[in-house]
Structure formats: structure tokens, C-alpha cells
């Protein structure tokens, strides 16, 4: 189902920017396994998978900080920085080796990206540029997109360490606008959580929310312009009159 809160002027869109985790891919199990492997390495008990998945969205460092704090039953501010540094380094190494064990593209993603990529060829409309902007570190983000056959659709795949700040700061989205010559009103951010909506709002861009991802519990806290229930609905949501 497509729910329109504020109509997006789709005819003028030039830049489509996608979040990764919870939007293009379901990476929850590999992230949960990597977090719990890190906790076990440092003598801490595992956390339930749904709990860890709920921490995804603000970048890998915050994911690990939240997990450590909960596992130790302390506030994030009380985490020993030496422990965090070692646990985060272990997490990154483990995740790099296991990032594609269970991760897969959501149903409809491949066909939707193909349809969006080819749309201008059939309609005669100007080509749209597509890119990825995620808070996941850039190396595993690129590796996952390549491994799942998604990378070829995107001009750039930018991660949480590609810029000095992460989403919801608009720097990454504005950088993509500058690189492609797209104005804010010609840009849409596609994502599954309020972080993505806030990123779009902070950059003056439009936002298409995905209710099937990791962040449906907070997606409507800052309502996007349009909400879809599956990736298969992206082409219609971004081309309808």
C-alpha cells in the first residue's frame, strides 16, 4: 500500500538516495550475530536479536555502545572507553568476515531498482541518479552491495565514515546533491527510520518511508512524505502523477 501524506512532485526528481540497512537489505541477523560475538568475546552475555536490531540506524559505533551498555546494565555514558574501543574493533573485524552470511536484499528491491534505472529510457524523461547513503561503515556497505548485485545501480555508495558526520546531519545528502547538480526539491531520501526522514528534512529534500524495515516503530515520529509497505512499490510511488 502507498500512503501519501504530502505529494512528491515526482516529475522533477533527479536524485534518489537510498538508506541501506532496513531499506535495501535485511542485514539484521548478521549484525545481531556480530554484536553478540563481540559481547561474548569480552565476557558479556548475549542480547535478544530484536533488541539489537532495534539499535540499528545511528551507525556501528552507537550500535556497539548501546549493546555494551545494555549488556552491562549501565548508562552509555558509563562505558569504559578502552572496552568500547576493543569491542568495536572486534565487531568490525567479525562483521567484515560475516556480513553476507544471512544478509539478503528485500523482496522486490532488485526489480524496483531495475525499473527505476530504466524508466527514463522508456519514457524519454531525464535520467535519475541513484545513490546509497548509510550510517554503516563504507567498506562493508560497498561489499554487501557488490555481493548482492546492487552496486551497479548506484553512482556512489557512501557510509557513516565517508563524511565527518553521520545522518541525520545533512552533509552526506547535500554532498550528493552538489555532485549530481540536484536541488533539494529534486531529491528524495528513501529510508526506513526517523533518522532518514530527519536527514531529508535537514537537507530540504523529500522523503519516502519504508514501513517494512528496522525502524517502523519510529518511522512516523517524524512523518515522511510518502510511506510504502514494500520495495516493489517504489517505482509507482516515485512515478505516479
Image (cartoon, rainbow, N blue to C red):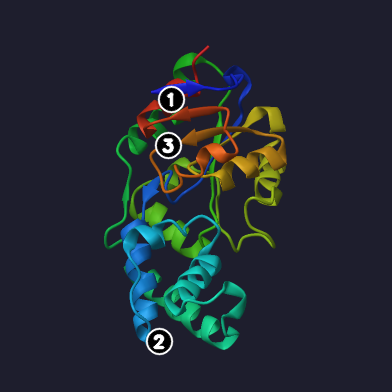
Q: Quadrant of the N terminus?
A: top left
Residue furthest left as drawn: 102
Q: Position of residue 140 (x, y in %)?
A: 44, 63
Q: CA distance from mark 3 to mark 1?
A: 16 Å
SS at circle 2:
loop
Q: Tell me the tag on residue 148.
A: none
- Residue 75, image quadrant: bottom right
Residue at image coords 36%, 55%: 27
Residue at image coords 36%, 37%: 109
Residue 99 in sight here: no
Q: Tell me the tag on residue 235.
A: 1
Residue 171 in sight here: yes
Residue indicated by mark 3: 211
Against 122, is 197 above or below?
A: below
Q: Is residue 120 left or right of residue 187?
A: left
Q: Position of residue 191 (x, y in %)?
A: 50, 41
Of 60 and 241, nearer the camera is: 60
Q: Is residue 175 left or right of residue 216?
A: right
Q: Position of residue 44 (x, y in %)?
A: 38, 82
Residue furthest top as drawn: 241
Q: CA distance from mark 3 to mark 2?
A: 35 Å
Residue indicated by mark 2: 42
- Residue 6, image quadrant: top right
Against 92, is 160 above or below?
A: above
In terms of sequence position, does the residue under pointer 2 or pointer 1 come before the other? 2
Q: Residues within 10 Å of mark 1 (few under 14, many from 20)?
A: some
In terms of sequence position, does the residue under pointer 3 or pointer 2 come before the other? 2
Of circles 2 and 1, which is in front? 2
Amino acid at each position: 500500500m502507498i500512503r501519501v501524506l504530502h505529494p512528491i512532485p515526482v516529475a522533477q526528481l533527479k536524485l534518489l538516495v537510498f538508506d541501506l540497512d532496513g531499506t535495501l537489505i535485511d542485514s539484521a541477523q548478521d549484525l545481531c550475530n556480530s554484536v553478540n560475538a563481540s559481547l561474548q568475546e569480552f565476557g558479556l552475555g548475549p542480547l535478544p536479536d530484536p533488541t539489537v536490531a532495534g539499535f540499528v540506524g545511528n551507525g556501528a559505533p552507537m550500535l556497539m555502545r548501546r549493546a555494551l551498555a545494555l549488556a552491562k546494565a549501565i548508562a552509555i555514558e558509563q562505558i569504559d572507553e578502552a572496552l568500547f574501543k576493543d569491542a568495536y574493533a572486534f565487531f568490525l573485524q567479525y562483521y567484515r568476515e560475516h556480513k553476507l552470511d544471512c544478509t539478503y536484499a528485500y523482496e522486490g528491491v532488485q526489480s524496483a531498482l531495475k525499473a527505476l534505472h530504466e524508466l527514463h529510457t522508456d519514457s524519454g524523461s531525464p535520467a535519475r541518479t541513484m545513490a546509497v547513503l548509510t550510517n554503516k561503515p563504507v567498506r562493508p556497505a560497498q561489499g554487501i552491495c557488490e555481493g548482492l548485485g546492487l552496486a551497479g545501480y548506484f553512482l556512489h555508495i557512501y557510509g557513516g565514515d565517508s563524511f565527518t558526520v553521520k545522518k541525520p546531519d545533512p552533509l552526506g545528502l547535500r554532498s550528493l546533491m552538489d555532485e549530481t547538480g540536484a536541488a533539494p526539491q529534486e531529491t528524495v531520501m528513501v529510508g526506513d527510520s526517523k533518522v532518514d526522514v530527519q536527514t531529508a528534512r535537514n537537507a530540504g529534500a523529500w522523503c519516502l518511508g519504508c514501513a517494512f524495515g528496522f525502524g517502523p516503530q519510529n518511522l512516523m515520529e517524524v512523518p515522511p512524505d510518502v510511506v510504502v509497505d514494500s520495495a516493489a512499490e517504489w517505482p509507482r510511488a516515485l512515478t505516479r502523477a
